[in-house]
Image: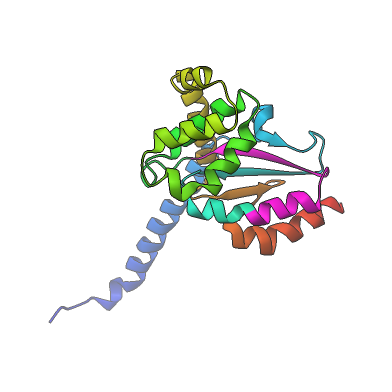
Amino acid sequence: MISFDMDRLPRLIASAALVVAASAGSFYAARGSRKPFSPRAPAYRTLGPADAKVTIVEFSDFECPACRVAEAPLRAILKLHDGKVRLVFKHFPLERMHRWARPAAIAAECAGKQGKFWEFHHELYERQAEWASGKSDERLASYAKKLGLDSAAWLACRQDPAVDAAVGADYQDGRNAWVGGTPTFFINGKRFVAALQLSERGAPWVEKELKK
């Protein structure tokens, strides 16, 4: 039988509490040392007026099924409040889970440099099951051709280290904001995760912010 000294119990509880407090303190200190994320993005990755009362910053992954599902409530919000809300798209490719997420982000970025980011964005989500299942490079190229992009310029852009770095900077921005999964939305700084939160809580929050 294991014996236990009851006289030591209060000291053990106090010691455990100190350990928990120290751990929590370290966590919040580390969190406090993080830089705030930037709501900025290239003009081709934004929609809506720059002086809008409400800004939605979206961290998304093109290979993420939940991101595709969130497109419907997001578009509904933008349509309902057309001209009053600004959307800023940020890349957050979850490479450990989604092999083609970063190449797709780079492909969309290069489409954006030719003025077709949102068109390519829509193709990627609407045809997600197609390009994410195989022959991805070939299929991404077919979308570029369909949208009338300069194929040579688009292919060269995809090899540009600066474009890869831009995607990486967005990802780091998400890490700074403690984004843990996709899609994550910040509406005037308030966090909403996935389609359900966006539709049930995010949409009313937009209306509340617009009334201020």
Q: Hey, which residue is sitting farthest bottom in the picture? A: 1
Q: Residue furthest left?
A: 1
Residue at 32% across, 67% down? 12
Looking at the image, which is closer to me, 147 or 84?
A: 147
Is residue 104 visible in this depiction of the protein? yes
102 shown above or below 6: above
User: x and y percent of residue 58 in the render?
Assistant: 61, 44
Q: Residue at x 51, y 47 (%)?
A: 127
Is 122 left, or right, of 209 in this rendering? left
Residue drawn at x 65%, y 33% as measured from the top left: 45
Quadrant of the image containing the N terminus:
bottom left
Tell me where residue 32 appears, x and y as whole percent: 54, 41
Q: How many marks do you count on the picture?
A: 0
Q: Nearer the viewer, residue 162 or 1?
A: 162
- Residue 106 magenta-highlighted: no
Where 149 falls versus 86 (above or below)? above
The x and y percentages for residue 16 are 36, 62
Position of 43 with respect to 139 (left or right) is: right
| Magenta highlight range | 72-92
**Residue 138 in the image: x percent, y percent?**
41, 33
